[in-house]
Amino acid sequence: MAEEHLDGSRTVRYGEEEFERPAGGETHQTARDGRPPLTTQQGVVVADNQNTLGAGARGPALLEDFPFREKLFHFDHERIPERVVHARGFGAHGYFETYESLSDVTRADLFQEAGRRTPAFVRFSTVAGNKGSTDLARDVRGFAVKFYTREGNWDLVGNNIPVFFIQDAIKFPDIIHAAKEAPDRGFPQAQTAHDNFWDLVSLLPESTHMLLWIMSDRAIPRSFRFMEGFGVHTFRLIDAQGRSTFVKFHWKPKQGLQSVLWNEALKISGADPDFHRRDLWDAITSGDFPEWELGLQLFDDEFADRFAFDVLDPTKLIPEEEVPIRTVGRLVLDRVVDNFFAETEQVAFCTQNVVPGIDFTDDPLLQGRNFSYLDTQLKRLGSPNFTSLPINAPKCPVAHFQQDGHMAMANPTSRANYEPNSWGPGVGGPREDPVRGFHSAPAAQVGEKRRLRPDSFADHYSQARQFFISQTPVEQRHIIDAFVFELSKCERDDIRLRMLGGLRHVHDDLARGVADGLGVEQLPEPVEAARRPITDLPPSPALSLVANGPASVAGRKVGILLADGFDSSSLQALRAAAEEEGATVEIIAAHVAGATGSDGSRVAAGQKIDGAPSVLYDAVAVLASADGAARLARLPAARDFVSDAYAHCKFIAYAPETGPLLEVAGVAGLLDDGFVRLDDGRASADAFIERCRQVRLWDRQLAAAGS
Ligand code: HDD
């Protein structure tokens, strides 16, 4: 039944329902309340999305119910295999901007001209945990960047740690199996604190350097925005004349470096398992775009020959003090994804994706990776046509003779599908171009076909030692504590002792400290070492997080706990001081409805105290009247808020009336330089924010540890 209007539109009735169909009458333009109609995948408008087709109201379901069967069929197939490693990730779009032409060292198009912007997509990840695990696992973070250059896609598939566990890709399945859940019980999830992991690494001395890094605070970053990234391997840059220069890639966050404490990581995992992804999402959607600068360590054969380690060994880094970093551009992340699955999940990085001007070296780990990534994408994305998915497709012309396969989307439309051919332009398809095309750097190769680990890879401890001595005392303490925590979770004594035997080659303080933490009185003999470690490598200050921390509170989050009667002008002053510095403020109260200030105005809360422990903030403040503070003091979550902030070395601003809360939190008698009393309006708010620039009062932790 239809009623036609003067403008050609119609009101259509099906049973009780009425639909407006615009002039022209296309069903898909038909809308109820201005919304498009719900359809099946075949475009048929669905009449009822609430009830299956049955024989009578209480009768059996009918097989002919195609909208129902199609809906369930598609739902049943929604999941694709998660990544075998780096399953949990979070991506964002942005661009890379070159500062100056690098034509002196590479012909790669993205580096040819100052100011050139190349679109980029970045996916950060944890390695071991499954897709649904927590962001704050102690783990390496993936830092994978896809550059959509004008001459093809370049994937720099790096981590936030500049070295790796193993030297040869043949050990990758072993290290990953040992790190992930045990196959019999399916746990532990997203952690290395278990026998299998420590059993393997204590038998693999080449992992020692990496172990120092993952037991350091690098493995528990405050967020993706505050961590470095590294290409890890030595690569090559090739200039227009075909000359090659070795290169190591570094990403330096403009936001500065910052990590959390292990006890915080444990608590954040409970309070907000999405802490890192939420942080990135919030920063980008609020217009605070994170940036990293790309740095290159460039060196030649002469340096490679005299360097104390093999530049092809991925368990070694080159200290920045030995080969300074040349900063060549910036990466800005300015757009979140529109659809997590389409972009973050379906993005496929492959180390073999290089462009003219960038080439591989013979690093055996890199060579193995070049096989693995393409292989895994086929399993995960189901078809060799994953390169046509919008997130993976190059943004430059693509022309080849590859065809067909599952889900072929870019199909040839002309006759010739082979080359060479004698068909003319247009029909005959593309041709190779020896000038613009990719050339591998020529290299003379001789050698026996054998399975050998080079002698130049045999030193497994010297750089681990260098890393340890480059840390500040508080960072060394954290490394020791992390070893103690993880090894204490091992059930087998012999594994702990073997690990201690390895650590004896690194540093006495480390081995002794870990032994003390484990309650081992007699240190075991050092394990057998292929080579004596070099003990006079100098510290490399660039390796410390604390020494390279932020100089500002910009990009950080201050949590302000309010109770009724708080001084409204103090809140205004605090908020202004924080926001002028580029920090964000979140209000926390006993109820999300918020609290009423001294001027009678109500301030809504972003969080109820039970859901907002202080681990979610970089610094905290408590504002309340005496009555309000007494009420807060009765809430266990409010007590923890303050006592945790103190234990985690955070700066704490407090109104003079909040004494009762400080008292029950156990900190009233411990007021140190980390506390700022808010009794002087804007001046005390400014003093608080100024102190927060240090992010943590590490002396508090050292004092507590009696160091
Ligand atoms: Fe890998 C994923 C980084 C060694 C095999 N790897 C993957 C990702 C990152 C890295 C960041 C996630 C990419 C994404 O977000 O989709 N992997 C590294 C680094 C390594 C490294 C920095 C050492 C320097 N990886 C490595 C080895 C192998 C692999 C030695 C195998 C021989 N990696 C893979 C993989 C993954 C992967 C199985 C799983 C999912 C994927 O590739 O797309 O191919």
Image (tube, grey):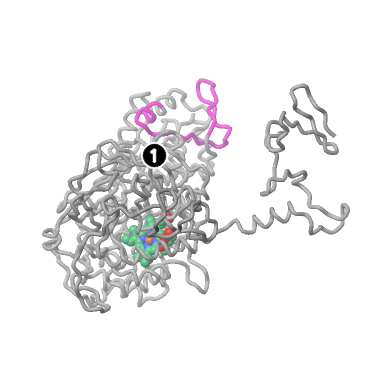
Residue at (72, 37) in percent of width and height = 27
* Residue 682: quadrant of the picture: top left
- Total labels drawn: 1
* Residue 671: quadrant of the picture: top left
Quadrant (top left/top right/bottom left/bottom right) for the C terminus: bottom left
Q: Is residue 174 above or below residue 107?
A: below
Residue at (78, 49) in percent of width and height = 51
* Residue 365: quadrant of the picture: bottom left
Q: Secondary structure at mark 1?
A: strand
- Residue 138 in sight in this render: no
Residue at (26, 65) in percent of width and height = 363
* Image region (quadrant) for ligand 1: bottom left
Q: Is residue 506 magenta?
A: no
Q: Nearer the viewer, residue 127 or 157?
A: 157
Q: How far across and how far down the image is residue 307, in percent?
A: 14, 61
Write the start and end of the magenta stretch as one range. 576-605
Q: Nearer the viewer, residue 304 or 468?
A: 304
Q: Residues within 10 Å of mark 1 (few under 14, many from 20)?
A: many
Q: Is residue 242 above or below residue 330?
A: below
Residue indicated by mark 1: 619
Q: How far across and how far down the image is residue 496, in percent?
A: 34, 72
